[in-house]
Amino acid sequence: MAVKNLWPVVALAVAAPSAALANADLAKLMADSKNWAAPSGDFKNHRHTKLTQINKSNVNKLQVAWTFSTGVLRGHEGGPLVIGDTLYVHSAFPNKVFAINLADQTIKWKYEPKQDPSVIPVMCCDTVNRGLAYGEGKILLQQADTTLVALDAKSGKVVWSVKNGDPKVGQTNTNAPHVFKDKVFTGISGGEFGVRGWMAAYNLKDGKLAWKGYSMGPDSDMLMDPATSMTWTDGKMAPVGKDSSLKTWKGDQWKIGGGTTWGWFSYDPDLNAMYYGNGNPSTWNPKQRPGDNKWSMSLFSRDVDTGKVNWVYQMTPHDEWDFDGVNEVPLFEANGRKLLAHFDRNGFAYTLDRKTGELLVAEKYDPAVNWATHVDKKTGRPQVVSKYSTAQNGEDVNTKGICPAALGTKDQQPAAYDPNSGLFLVPTNHVCMDYEPFRVEYTAGQPYVGATLAMFPAPNSHGGMGNFIAWDPIKGKIVWSIPEKFSVWSGAMTTATGLAFYGTLDARLKAVDIKAGKVVWTSPKLPSGVIGNVHSWEFGGKQYVGILTGIGGWAGIGLAAGLEKDSDGLGAVGGYKELAKYTDLGGTLMVFALAN
Amino acid sequence: MNITTVYMAGAVIAAVLAAPLAQAATAQEKGILRVCADPNSMPFSNAQAEGLENRIARLMAEDFGWKAEFYYFPQRMAFFRNTLRKKAENGEDGYVCDLATSSAPEAEGAVATKAYYTSTWTMVFRAGEGLDQVRQPDDLLKLPKDKLAKLRFGVFPASPGADWVFRNGFENQMVPYQQMLGDPSSYPGQIVDTALTRGDIDVAFVWGPIGSYHARQSKPVKMRVVPMVPDAETVTDFSIAMAVRFREPDWKAKVEDFLARRKTDIDKILSDYGVPLVAKDGSVLIGGERFERPKSGGTGH
């Protein structure tokens, strides 16, 4: 396929700066790479630093500068913010926040929310938290119990607090809040409890709800305009039409339809649009929810002010594999066109025109992916391979060797963009699964037939469960791939000096030469395995690289899970025991810098 | 993870890395049977120890010459991790409890014992409202069309009731309920206690022990309970076991020996709570009333 046909050169309109004051302030902080002012560093989710002190020739001189324990053992995802002379770091449940003075690493203030103990059954699972946001002098914390709280960045005092959901009906939060313009954006978790997902925007000023758009249901709930909300239809964008979601569900089942929203969000100030993906269609068996189950498993563009859906694209219609679509949606430009990328759990990497929602590229970013042959460009639908369809095989068939496994070719751990090479640096899983139906589930005193997954490293490959890859989002091709023993569950970061950093589950921080595709530095052993994200900042004339360590979460469960097929006992088999050999629990921020 | 689970889904790395070096025999050596149970899941257990599992546990303790103690945690996701596999604190050795009194026959994150009873999913409806002749779900299809078209069916996702509703094209008459909620004061029996009593729905598809117990408890509104019927597409019958930690075969054997030796006493307790019991020939006994059915061919056993 001729690349030039795919990429008509469209002159970018020079948009007048339309952003509100708060936005301008935050944009200014982000523009200075001495800060790390948003969960992913900037509105576009590039996870890129312009700082140049650390480069290919001196990266091997990195040393530990200082460390900080959160005092919490559960899995630590996300990473800290840095604003000026202060670093703000969060912990897993109970979601502590520390403001650390970078000059002497003393604690300026500490905030520990009191979360309702009656929600223990929903908090029971490894409650990660993916970090904080900053805006207008406030630090935003999205607690597990759904309380969204704004803290005074100077004092740690609560400025306002609002309940985003209700844990009593299974709603919880793990996502980082995001500040765009004059609003704070947050989603919701709890697909296991049948929660119907939404995106909510609260006023940064006072915490008042500005709008809330659901993942499914009537057009009015979704903030969908049948005439002007668009979707990819037969090779072009067309209006979604009336009741585009309701038509794809039976009866009232959309009310507990899932499509939760616990990933990372991005923002284009010029288009006044925000972007995110949502999760799978809840607790119904696939055969009990015939149809596409829209708009679960979809990418959304919404108007920042009103929440109106600009466009929506469903990656995995009628999900049979638990391929949540929540992964990050980084924004970039190429050939004069405003684009976005999305590395889906389903193993396909997508490039879309973020202004129009047009589908441009959808290619496998792990060669092991086999559940679909390809994504049909005209319909935008994956072409499912019958033998890997759990529904087509029926409930009495053990569907073997589906790649990727339910945890996806990539989970939430975000990729980084390198604006210099135009490549994405992507942490991935290299794991397949057997899908075994007729496994009896037992929940709240009720047995019923569910399914069980057995996961294992992708066969006929390097034997490891992960890769760190460079991806060309225009050609839709892997440029290079570095095999990893375990899934790469750490958010990556790129530098202006051509380096990419990522952490590993076996507790190392690594630096890669992006051009060569070679690891050029590996840290000494970290206190715990990494499921957090790498970031960078400058203070006192020195560049620092930080990584939040502390294994747990899905990574722990996923890895452990898949390799434990033997009911004889723990640690009896392969990788489970393997990982235990490398690392143990504990949340610690590790900070590296060049030796003096 | 939603409809599916993963092997060992109940186990996070915490439990893994804290390898159980010591057999959790401490409490047992002291003659204490520490039971992991739900504080609000009648008829099985509650914080007042009034459920059938509470009684069976006390019978077991008595049989062993021990004392029964209960460690309560809502039975949601990761129940075993938060009970059976949770290390005791306050300097105590071992775990917070050593036996879960109910489990699927293939436990995830623990080892199931042999099953101690088999029950079935049921249909519960208000008596005296024109459904009294119904003895199984398909009897509903014989009702007058206008009557049938007005019925509201309460179902849990992924349950055999949902299968029946979809297969017969009643999805627009379906009212979905969640198996588990975050609120510890909620329990699945509310589909009978609240929804059916109040008239939100006309028919509740519910796991037999829960449906039967709550139907019997319903004083102002008289309820009928009839079994579902298994077929090639739908499993309705399930066996319930107990569960212990991995690598405790002696303890598992001791529990299984009790379950076998005291079967008659256990069956008596089950019948006290109105648990529908599936006989070898497939028939179901609910509160003294026998329902003939074809033998189950499913894998629920």
Image (cartoon, rainbow, N blue to C red):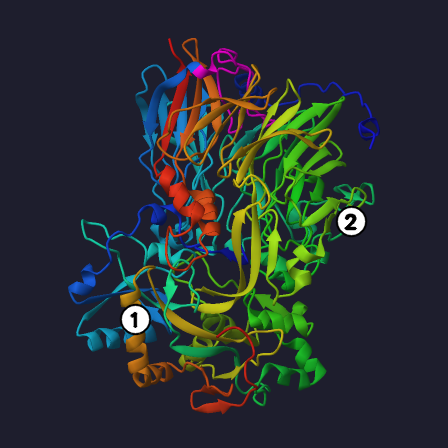
Q: Amino acid at mark 2?
A: Gly
Report helix, strand or loop for mark 2.
Answer: loop
Against A497, residue A403 (above or below) is: below
Say whether marks 2 and 1 touch (CB < 8 Å).
no
Q: What subunit carries mark 2?
A: A
Label 1, residues with CA under 10 Å away: few <14, some 14-19, many ≥20: few
Q: Which residues are magenta?
A: A31-60
Q: Is residue A155 visible?
A: no
Q: Relative to A196, does residue A49 appear above or below in the rendering?
A: above
- Which residue matches tag 1? B253
Q: In the drawing, does residue B121 fall left or right of residue A290?
A: left
Residue B53 place in picture, x, y as percent = 33, 73
Observer-nearest of B199 and A581: A581
* Disc nearest the viewer among 2 and 1: 1
Same chain, marks 2 and 1?
A: no
| Label annotation for residue A127 | none
Q: Nearer the viewer, residue A535 or A199?
A: A535
- Measured as percent of width and height from the top left, residue A361 is found at 74, 35
User: What's the mark number on residue A241?
Assistant: 2
Secondary structure type for disc 1: helix
- Tell me the CA gap for discs 2 and 1: 62 Å
- Residue B254: horizontal and vertical position, in percent? 27, 72
Dominant SS type (magenta): loop
Residue sitting nearer the eye, A61 or A80: A61
Q: Nearer the viewer, residue B301 or A176?
A: B301
Q: Is residue A126 left or right of residue A187?
A: left
Specify whether residue A48 is painted magenta: yes
Furthest toward the left, the residue is: B30
- The disc labelled 1 sits on which kind of residue? Ala
